[in-house]
Amino acid sequence: MRDDLPFVEQIHRDLRDVQWPAPEEIRFRARRRSQRRIVVATVVLALAGVSAVAVAAPRQSPSPDQPAASASPTRHEISTDALLQPADLTLPVAPPKYPWQLSQSGLGEPVLLDHLLADCRTSQGLSLGWPTSILSRSQTLLREHPPGPRNEGDALVSQDLFRLTPEAATQLFTGLDDMIAPCVEWRSVGTLDTAGVLSTIETVHRWAVTQRGFAGDDAAILRDSLTAARDVKTGQTDGDDPPPILLAVVRVGDTVSVLRLGYDGTEAELRQLAVAAAARMCAAANPAC
């Protein structure tokens, strides 16, 4: 674990000079996304070829009293229609105009719920327990902003949308309690470098599942209530306890979405977004809504 990881909570609260990628970097990511789309298209075409062979195989027509079963077509690639749209942002922080949208797709990505939750488990010698997705698409919705550098406060919401096997998607939710059980009170210790002076500080994280079953086929809100960083040697703390870290996890069919607000929002606001996300996920889910 890197020394600076325990201080994410301070950055979440105080840091306002993080720079977003330069246009060249965004274009590079777009090219990489296009390459991934080609791979996804190849997979879909391969699947379509298999289906064509199956259709070409001889088969008997159903008898009049046994009509052929109709099945919804299987969805493969995750389209942008399945993601939250700017119109879904009815939160108090939403800008009057549509925000910017950065999106990227992937193959075989782990369903990472939170880096701090991952640190908690690995620091105790435990496996991460993240299932691996088949396909994924991620986005960040940003406030509309004049040309120039961006900062962390411009982010409104981030969303990761994954397609899993149906069994893995269901197991993610049935195993949530076991996943966070070792982290219900986790003491994170690290080193802080202040003008060349090193000090050891600690922060206590308390993970919990606070809400369930409010959207889609399944849903949960995870909350990390953390304390202010405390100097282990002097006992002094850095201000008040920061706001909790919140994330929502939603399942519709074989798709799972992980949502995080880009500001100090409430559970009610996050839940509202999760409900909107579940409705959008119907465009990608198997079976169809």
Image (cartoon, helix red, strand yellow):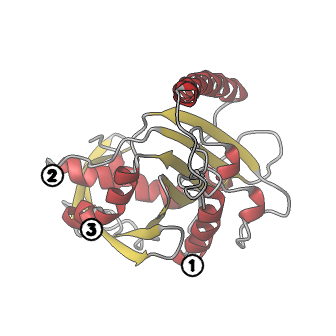
Between marks 1 and 2 in the image, the one whose residue lies nearer the viewer = 1
In this figure, which residue is indicated by the disc labeled 1? 268
> In this rendering, does residue 242 appear at all?
no
Instruction: Compute the Cα span from label 3 to label 2.
Output: 17 Å
Instruction: Specify few, some or many for label 2: CA neighbours under 10 Å numbering under 14, 14-19, or 20 or more.
Output: few
Residue that appears at 61% across and 22% down = 38
Q: Looking at the image, is 16 positioned above or below residue 249? A: above
Mark before the other along the chain sequence, 3 or 2:
2
> Could you tell me which quadrant the N terminus lies in?
top left
Q: Position of residue 249 (x, y in %)?
A: 46, 62
Residue that appears at 58% across and 50% down = 68
Left or right: residue 160 versus residue 195 is: right
Left or right: residue 169 versus residue 154 is: left
> In this rendering, does residue 56 appear at all?
yes
Callout 1: SS = helix
Mark before the other along the chain sequence, 3 or 1:
3
Name the amino acid type tagged 1.
Ala
Callout 3: SS = helix
Callout 2: SS = loop
In this figure, which residue is indicated by the disc labeled 3? 177
Q: Position of residue 188 (x, y in %)?
A: 24, 57
Name the amino acid type tagged 2.
Gln
Mark before the other along the chain sequence, 1 or 2:
2
Between marks 3 and 2 in the image, the one whose residue lies nearer the viewer = 3
**Quadrant of res 276:** bottom right
Q: Residue furthest front?
A: 64
Instruction: Specify few, some or many for label 1: CA neighbours under 10 Å numbering under 14, 14-19, or 20 or more.
Output: few
In this figure, which residue is indicated by the disc labeled 2? 124
Name the amino acid type tagged 3.
Asp
**Quadrant of res 74:** top right
